[in-house]
Amino acid sequence: MQVTETVEITGHLMDSGLLSRVLDDIRGYGGEYTLDKFDLGYDKDDPSTVRMTVGAEDEESLQRLLMRIQTKGANLVDPGTPEITEVTQDGVFPDGFYSTTNLPTNVRLGGHWVEVRNPEMDCGLLVEGDTVRTIPMSEVRAGMRIITSAQGVRVIPPITEATEGGFGFMESDVSSEKPQRVLVRQVADGMREAKANGQKVLWVGGPGIVHTGAAPAMVALVEAGFVDVLFAGNALATHDIESSLYGTSLGVDLDRGRGVEHGHEHHIRAINTIRKAGSIAAAVEQGVLTSGVMHALVKNGNRFVLVGSVRDDGPLPDVYTDVLEGQRAMRAELPDVGFCLMAATMLHSVATGNILPASIPLTCVDINPATVTKLADRGSSHARGIVTDVGLFVEHLARELSPSYADRK
Amino acid sequence: MQVTETVEITGHLMDSGLLSRVLDDIRGYGGEYTLDKFDLGYDKDDPSTVRMTVGAEDEESLQRLLMRIQTKGANLVDPGTPEITEVTQDGVFPDGFYSTTNLPTNVRLGGHWVEVRNPEMDCGLLVEGDTVRTIPMSEVRAGMRIITSAQGVRVIPPITEATEGGFGFMESDVSSEKPQRVLVRQVADGMREAKANGQKVLWVGGPGIVHTGAAPAMVALVEAGFVDVLFAGNALATHDIESSLYGTSLGVDLDRGRGVEHGHEHHIRAINTIRKAGSIAAAVEQGVLTSGVMHALVKNGNRFVLVGSVRDDGPLPDVYTDVLEGQRAMRAELPDVGFCLMAATMLHSVATGNILPASIPLTCVDINPATVTKLADRGSSHARGIVTDVGLFVEHLARELSPSYADRK
Amino acid sequence: MQVTETVEITGHLMDSGLLSRVLDDIRGYGGEYTLDKFDLGYDKDDPSTVRMTVGAEDEESLQRLLMRIQTKGANLVDPGTPEITEVTQDGVFPDGFYSTTNLPTNVRLGGHWVEVRNPEMDCGLLVEGDTVRTIPMSEVRAGMRIITSAQGVRVIPPITEATEGGFGFMESDVSSEKPQRVLVRQVADGMREAKANGQKVLWVGGPGIVHTGAAPAMVALVEAGFVDVLFAGNALATHDIESSLYGTSLGVDLDRGRGVEHGHEHHIRAINTIRKAGSIAAAVEQGVLTSGVMHALVKNGNRFVLVGSVRDDGPLPDVYTDVLEGQRAMRAELPDVGFCLMAATMLHSVATGNILPASIPLTCVDINPATVTKLADRGSSHARGIVTDVGLFVEHLARELSPSYADRK
Amino acid sequence: MQVTETVEITGHLMDSGLLSRVLDDIRGYGGEYTLDKFDLGYDKDDPSTVRMTVGAEDEESLQRLLMRIQTKGANLVDPGTPEITEVTQDGVFPDGFYSTTNLPTNVRLGGHWVEVRNPEMDCGLLVEGDTVRTIPMSEVRAGMRIITSAQGVRVIPPITEATEGGFGFMESDVSSEKPQRVLVRQVADGMREAKANGQKVLWVGGPGIVHTGAAPAMVALVEAGFVDVLFAGNALATHDIESSLYGTSLGVDLDRGRGVEHGHEHHIRAINTIRKAGSIAAAVEQGVLTSGVMHALVKNGNRFVLVGSVRDDGPLPDVYTDVLEGQRAMRAELPDVGFCLMAATMLHSVATGNILPASIPLTCVDINPATVTKLADRGSSHARGIVTDVGLFVEHLARELSPSYADRK
């Protein structure tokens, strides 16, 4: 090993398996390590600290390795100062750029630790004067100053409390074999807590919410104040509006609960109707759209960001057809979000997981275990997955959180 | 074509696609047909009648073909008299035995149509004096008289009413995108109707009922009188009892809703406890077992048939370890069943589908689409499949059918 | 019924169940019908013809109903002339616009039947002089002339041959229980036939192609000339390039076949590298990208259209970030496509299904049955679904179609 | 804490996360611990040793807790002597019986460590003279001597080598996104290694092997000597035999690869034919059965154990209808098994996982991720899961292992 650095990691290293994952990373990157110090927390609530020397074949490999294990919270003992490189080409990071995690991160500038704004994974770190923020690759412009070292950067790992509740939440079990009422209650508690803290509840939803008949329950949740922002695509809004205008959703007759293939072209007429009105809000104002989830959001003054995809018909006039613009619009809604529920959508869930700081509690509900698994595979490992029927789940959630809905039947 | 016969079929041939399936069968078996008469129902509620001549290469092929299309209701115009062959070897049908469907069937004996008792698929037809009943292969004994022709046999096809409800029910859509509350209500209605007719409600259940926390809701349904008979395996009963004795179910702590791997060996201790008591009912009497689904069934004097499988631990003393004996015990419970709900079990659902007459309304609830698909693939095409979370589904069902449960929270 | 029209439908009405679906549609739209004439094909290969009078409550309902059953091939006996309405608002169709199918369609202009260009579902019919073509809603501009009636429009239903092969292909079974070698051979035959006809083979692919290790097999298929066009997203191209640059694909080490979480940020560095080069083709030219699927496509002069989505990192410089522009680019590649294979992608498969004429043979391969089911649910019912492992499937396909690949091992 | 004991655990405690799982167990059982000694392996290949004092509220809780953590390899420092209790009731273990794991286990008898024969999970430990073996609950008889303490018992935890290969194998990833060719090769290597060691290869198979067209490939593997024993149910054998007698498998025409519903009753006739012959072997001898997997097993003198289930038709005369007898027959085949492949069956895979020692390498192949997940959930965590198409997988495996099969096409 040509080059080495000393790092330290503190936390519930044993209980959480964190240390073994760091050591695994070092081997995976072809590096080596020697353990220099090991302070074990003897009581179950005490954190442990490990100091080790990490080595790699060359400076570049070492930097990559250090950046990697920093994502687990293994920071340099001697942080040093960051290397900063100027961008020479729009939309292109300098070589060796520091690729971010979604964890709270600090950068050492002028002898002080500066907190990175807007933690988001897979971004660069942009230095502007004495502040640092994440910046996505597509936003970077020539002349910007980007960090290109592990030195001078520190990641604060998630606090995994070695308590019952804490661990329960960390177990990313993706299983349908769980007592479902308890899970509903935990999500309800998470939403109540966010609201109590003056934070926003973010929903990320797919059309399954409408297809499973959960729209009335979601409307009740909007009215009860538990849907501050909705991220969705063209499909959720379209089928919600179609359902309001025609009583059908992609050929599913919602009152009688039977599949009718016949409604097939209703969705395209529904989109045309809203385009004619100018926007969803305009359609509500003009009395064209009088019910449903989108109507409730407009009426309650809540926010929604609809981002399109290549499979869209229409789309609705409110839909961002440029996905980078859509990402920007989503990012703009993240401040003050205190709880995020993802329901019945893979695409927008992964998209939201990409930009969400790890510190925001996140629950993903889907009938398809693969959706939650994919979410976890791609970095949102703090996501809690619930494999269940979205229709019945949102129904239960509305009964928990909306007293009037619970009384209704 | 060497040999021919004339058959006739009546029903909603157009609407239901029945005719096209019969013609498909004929081609599939290498036969030919000419349409002799076509009486079309001009109004949408009128049945149509088609008479056709069917031919095959030889007598044996023709018999096989006739037996086949009879399963769709295409009966011989001139029924003739059945060929009856004596069994020469225990447990073996004569060659060319008539393999039954699960549809109402008549046999022509002594110039009269005699109704076959206990319609069940994949059986033989046993003639005893002037009665006929189905008999499974394993029950047949030397000397018994078995029908070995399509002649003399008539199948009454299912009445697929060309009405909304009828069609809705026939659509075997296996989809999770359905308004779930409506589906719950339809199952509740089916159960109420069976009880109103003085018939029994049969449940076929898997351990998922316990794992998803639905046991309390199912207990409420037992107490409300909507679980007359339960077919299950060792697992449902064991995890229900484990949950009652230890508060866990295969490592899922039901109160806190988090996976605890630790409970692992509780199930084997639970089984040992019941074996010590002698039986589930004895454990209830002795005050050892004081809650849960099995306790409720015993307390309410309801029936249950537990049939084992090769993966069982223990098993519980009530479990049939011989699967043929288990099938016999299940068959004995079928008379007067008026509704069947299958929840969260593939093995016992398919087993029940094998012996259930087609005339009994049947709904299968599972979070896994493959379970419902398999059920339909294997002949229970009248099954209605609901892809949803069993825990939340049974919870909703209990709120629909048990007033006290609905009030509880 | 206030208003009526007479329609006629010809085809294998019995065998295919087509008639029953048309009658079902009429009831579903609240219409009524009387059958006026029924010419039954007495031989199994003869088509049947049915003429019937269809009625609805008012003119608008009748038009909607007529448009609907036209999608099944039930055309007006007296076609009349189309009603044409001028567009008054950019991006908005006139009320009552004719919503297209993906079937071959004719419009009666100046006393002649004119063939509609570019059949595509959910579009309007744009009349330009004496030609008619489909136009998506977002492309329509004020002043354009759009058809707003069923009159004057004729749909040519798919020819479902009542032969073995034909039916085999039409059965949209979504099942993993099929002899897989036969299915591979059928896809190979479909591709060979397209090439023999001078047509193009279109692939729609997801990153699973790379993750399952199928990239070398796909490269062989590119080199053997069986991948004329590729539709994909940012992910397939990125993971292919990442795999070429770093030997990993989202943390899967392809040589040793074990999951390595460690490669996590490689994809973002891979994207940065290509952005620096300017484009994928430029990276190939500069010798930066020297292997993999994208490299093979560039080297062989084949086409690819990459359309982005909201979950994308980067993206690669070749990716359309505006989804409407992406759709336009995809449409531009459709002429002369003679076979389409969709592999391991839901999003781009549905997007392609939306714009593909029904006349193009289409096979969808995915390990997830839901992907194929969704495709069929949304209108691409002529899709053949194969539930299998994409990695092994493409491997087998390469052995069938590329002699050098078959010899390789 | 009233009562305490000192335990010690050695191994790659950090890398494997073993220690954190033990600590988790202690908390899960309501116990407490203090770490007494911690010898850390400083080099990555050195094992670590931890000694700790474990306490619980009462003696019974402590015993349960000690038994529990012993399953992870945490053994008593002062092993003491086992408590042995006589059985008083047939089929019932004494209270507090030691519930086994599937790991190598020793018992201290007469001052020596005696190795437990036939490690199998969820059994009791039967002391006979100076030997100890596992015994299932149903086999226990009054008068037998069963161990009822953690004292005097020692479990040898699995050696998880901290090497690349070792870890790769231990990662129980259940993912379809893996380079599939590599996985095939690894299974082939596992089988070759077992044969090279003079051990047997055990297959556990479901009917999917036949439905996916893999039977010819499996026949080649039988002939090449890589299928010493087969565990299956009635279904695999029946559909294999049906396919041989009629060329169909549950309505799937294997040559043309299209679903034919028509073959429906063939399976019941196939069973009748074999019952008439007396057994599968007799049918082979009589020239009735001339091809397929079962034929190949008989011809090659290989073993098979068919255990029935409640859903069986017939069944075949070779099928054990009593599941306890079936389990006994399966256990009798386990000695000398050196590799186990489970393919396309949940029921028999779980059943085999229940009785298989942890020391035998085990791979489970299924297109359904849930099957592998269930296997792992129930204790066979050393299973390697491959989510892929069984048909193509077995095809590839045959090409790897059978030179003649590879040449065939």
Image (spheres, coloured by chain):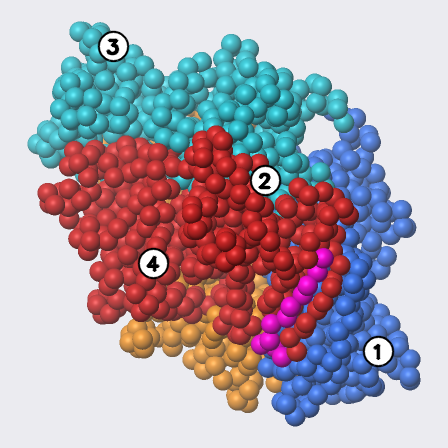
Chain colours: A red, B orange, C cyan, D blue
Q: In the rendered structure, which amino acid carries the disc numbered 1? A: Val
**Residue denoted by label 2:** A96
Residue C330 lies in what quarter of the image? top left
Disc 2 on helix, strand or loop?
loop
Residue located at (26% from left, 50% from top): A303
Q: Amino acid at mark 3?
A: Thr
The x and y percentages for residue C341 are: 51, 26
Do discs 1 and 2 share a chain? no
Given residues A76 and C188, the one toward you in this image is A76
The magenta segment:
A43-53
Alpha-carbon distance for marks 4 and 3? Answer: 55 Å
Which chain letter matches label 1? Answer: D
> Residue C135 lies in what quarter of the image?
top left
Disc 1 to disc 4, C-alpha distance: 60 Å
Residue A46 part of the magenta segment: yes
User: What's the amino acid at mark 2?
Assistant: Gly
Q: Chain of mark 2?
A: A
Q: Do the residues at discs 1 and 4 belong to one chain?
A: no
Give neighbour class at mark 3: few <14, some 14-19, many 20+ (Cα, 10 Å). few
- Horizontally, residue C10 falls left or right of residue D193, namely left
Q: Residue at x 64, y 68 (%)?
A: A49
Vertical comparison of A130 with D119: above or below: above
- Mark 4 closeness class: few <14, some 14–19, many ≥20 residues within 10 Å: some
Q: Chain of mark 3?
A: C
Q: For mark 4, what is the residue?
A: A336
- Kind of element beneath mark 1: strand
